[in-house]
Image (tube, helix red, strand yellow):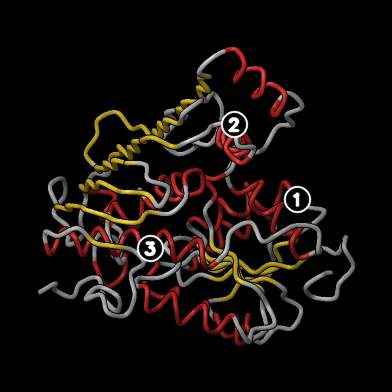
Amino acid sequence: MAITGKSDMSIRTVAIVGCGIGRSHIVEGYLPHSDKFKVVAICDLNEQRMAAVGDEFDIERRTTSFAELLADDTIDIIDICTPPGIHLEQVVAALAAGKHVVCEKPLTGSLAAVDIIMEAEKTAKGVLMPIFQYRYGDGIQKAKRIIDAGIAGKPYTASVETFWLRKPEYYAVPWRGKWATELGGVLVTHALHLHDMLMHLMGPAARVFGRVATRVNDIEVEDCASASLLMENGAFVSLSCTLGSQEQISRLRLHFENVTFESSHEPYTPGKDPWKIIAANDDVRKQIDRVVGDWQPVAPRFTTQMGQFHAFLSGHAPLPVTSRDARRALELVTAIYQSSDSGADVPLPVGPDSPKYADWRARTK
C-alpha cells in the first residue's frame, strides 16, 4: 500500500536543504531516478553556493527559508543536508509539517535526541529515512545475501578500519571540529558509515570498550579512536579509525565459519566490488555460486538508497534505512565515548541511565 495515497508511479517532489552534500544527493540520488523524483526547490543560507547548484541543475526555486518549504503543500520530501547541530529541530519540524524526510548522518547528537525523533515519527503522516549510503554496492550486497542465506555460518571475528585524512583546511569550515555544531569527530562524521556496514552484516554489539583522542588536528572533537566489541552473536570485533592516514582506505574484514569477506579499500565507496569472498571449501563455494550466480548489478551509495526509498513510498519494499538503524549506530558511538571517559566496559543497550544518553559531552563519574 502506498504511503501517501499517490499512484505507484508518481514522481515525488523534493526540496534539498543544504547545498553541500545536498549536491551529491541530486547527482547520485535523484537524477538517476528522474522518473521517480523531481528536485523542485533548494534552500541554503549561502546564497552563492545555492545559486551555483540551482544554475547547474536548472532548479528555479531557491530560498533561504526552511519554514517556507514546510508550508508548501506541493513538496513531498524534505531532504536535510545541513550541519548536524540543527538536524533535530529540522527533522521534527518537517515531520510535524506532514513531509517525508531524508536526513544526512549523523541523524542527531545524542540518544535522547534520537528518541525524541522516534517519538515524533509515531504520529507523523510522513516517514523518516536516515542516510547510510555506504550499505549499497555489489560487494556488500553480495555479502549480505550470502550471510542471510545461512551459508557463512558462525561469526568469529571482524576488523573495521576507517583510515582517512583531514587537514586543517577541512576544519576551516566554521561548524566543523566543534562539539556544538559537528556533534562529534571521526566516530560521528566519518567512521559511522563503516560501523553501520559492520552491524548491517554482523548484527548489533553487546559490550563495548573504547578509547578516543584528538591527535591529528587542533579541534575540539576526537580524530582518533579504537574500540573492542563483543557482538550479540558472540563474535569479537576491533574498530580503528583516524583522520591522519597518509593513504586513505576503508576496510572491513569479516571472518565466519565458512566464509571470509574483505571489502574493497576505496575510502568513500567501500560497498562496491571488488570484495574478496573466500570460501572454506568447494562445497561452500558451490553454495555461494548458487546464491549469487544470478547477480544483478547494484548501483552504489545514494543511487540505490533513493531508488529503494521510492519503492517503499510506492508500497513495494521495506524502508531501506530506519531511525532504529540510526539509533543503533549512535548507540555504539555513545558507548565508545562513555567507555573512553570512564575506562570501563559498557553494556548495550544504552538507555537514559547512561551519563552520555542526553549529552556526549557530559563527564562520566
Q: Which residue is mark 3?
A: 330
Q: Which residue is mark 1?
A: 33
How far across and down, in percent of the image, does residue 127 sit?
Answer: 65, 73
Give the distance between the C-alpha atoms of the residues marked 3 and 1, in whole angstroms: 30 Å
Who's the residue at 12% across and 64% down the image?
Answer: 342
Give the distance between the C-alpha atoms of the residues marked 2 and 3, in whole angstroms: 30 Å
Look at discs 1 and 2 and give the one toward the viewer: 2
Q: Which residue is mark 2?
A: 151
Q: Earlier in the sequence, mark 1 or mark 2?
A: 1
Who's the residue at 24% across and 34% down the image?
Answer: 245
Mark 1: give few (<14), some (14-19) or many (20+) Cα within 10 Å.
some
Q: Say which element carries label 3.
A: helix
- Which of the 4 image quadrants contains residue 336? bottom left
How far across and down, in percent of the image, does residue 1 sit?
Answer: 84, 69
Mark 2: give few (<14), some (14-19) or many (20+) Cα within 10 Å.
some
Look at discs 2 and 3 and give the one toward the viewer: 2
Quarter of the picture holding the C terminus? bottom left
Q: Is residue 128 above or below residue 209?
A: below
Report the amino acid beneath label 2: Ile
Q: Is 2 placed left or right of 110 in the picture?
A: right
Q: Is 256 placed left or right of 93 in the picture?
A: left
Who's the residue at 34% across and 59% down the image?
Answer: 332
Report the amino acid beneath label 3: Leu
Q: Earlier in the sequence, mark 2 or mark 3?
A: 2
How far across and down, in percent of the image, does residue 117 sit?
Answer: 49, 79
Q: Say which element carries label 1.
A: helix
